[in-house]
Image (cartoon, grey):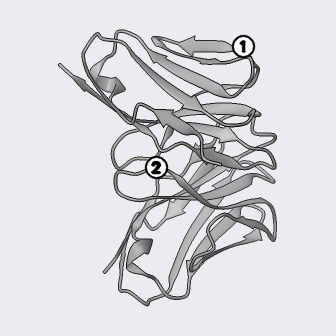
Amino acid sequence: QQPVQSPQAVILREGEDAVINCSSSKALYSVHWYRQKHGEAPVFLMILLKGGEQKGHDKISASFNEKKQQSSLYLTASQLSYSGTYFCGTDQGAQKLVFGQGTRLTINP
Amino acid sequence: SQTIHQWPATLVQPVGSPLSLECTVEGTSNPNLYWYRQAAGRGLQLLFYSVGIGQISSEVPQNLSASRPQDRQFILSSKKLLLSDSGFYLCAWFVGQMNTEAFFGQGTRLTVV
C-alpha cells in the first residue's frame, strides 16, 4: 500500500524551514527519502531503518518514529537548490519498494 | 563502479505499436531490479520488480510486461501501446536487503501519439 505524504506542495522563501511527512497504516522495514528535479531521475537523500532513528546531513534531516509508521523530512534554512519533488519510499517486505505521491517544494528568492 | 544504463532517453510511439525498454546494471551481481512509471506531475508508480533471473512480480496488470533474461538485464515490454502508457519510465536497482540506497537510471520519456 502506497505511503501517504503531506503536504502535497510547499512554497517557501529562501531561508525558511519545511517539514514533509510520510505515513503508513502498518509498520515499515525502512523508509527512504529521495529528491527529484524536473525531468531527472530521483536522487537518494537518506534511509532510516530503526524506530526512533534520526539522521541528517547538511541542513536536511529525517526521523522515523518508534512504531515505524511515520517519517518526517526536515529542511532547515532552505536554499534554492532544495527545490524539487520529494518522495518517501517504503520497504513493504519481499524487496518491494513503494513510493508516496510526492511533495513538490518550491523555494523562491 | 556500479552503473545503470537505461535507453532510449526519449521515445515517441503510435498507439497500438509495441514497446521495448531495456535496463542494464554493471558492477554488481544479483541486484533487485524495478520498473517505475511517472505520469506528468505525479508520483512514482511501481510496475514490476525482480529479485532474480526469471522472477517477476507485477504490480500493474494492464498491457505491460517485464522480463529478466539475464542477471543484470531488465526489460519492459508491451505488445500494443495505449495513450495512457505515456509517461516517464524509470529503472532502479538495489543490492541486498534494501538497507542501502536505490540507484535510478536516467529514465525514458515515452509519448504515445
Crowding at label 1, few (<14), some or many (≥20) Cα neighbours within 10 Å?
Answer: few
Kindly identify which chain the residue marked by label 2 belongs to: B
Residue at 66% x, 50% y: name it: B93
Question: Label 1 vs label 2: CA separation?
Answer: 27 Å
B60 with respect to B51 (left or right)? left
Residue at 40% x, 59% y: name it: B39
- Residue A71 picture location, percent across and down: 60, 24
> As rendered, which of B71 and B61 lies closer to the eye?
B61
A106 with respect to A72 (left or right)? left
- Residue A41 picture location, percent across and down: 46, 46
Q: Looking at the picture, does residue B15 appear above or below residue A71?
A: below
The image quarter containing residue B71 is bottom right
The image quarter containing residue A25 is top right
| Residue B43: mark | 2
Quadrant of the frame with the N terminus of chain B: top right
A89 with respect to B109 (left or right)? right
Q: Looking at the picture, does residue A98 appear above or below residue A19?
A: below
Which residue, given by chain and number where applicable, does mark 1 sit on? A52
State if disc 2 and disc 1 touch (CB < 8 Å): no
Look at label 2 and name its amino acid. Gly
Look at label 1 and name its amino acid. Gly
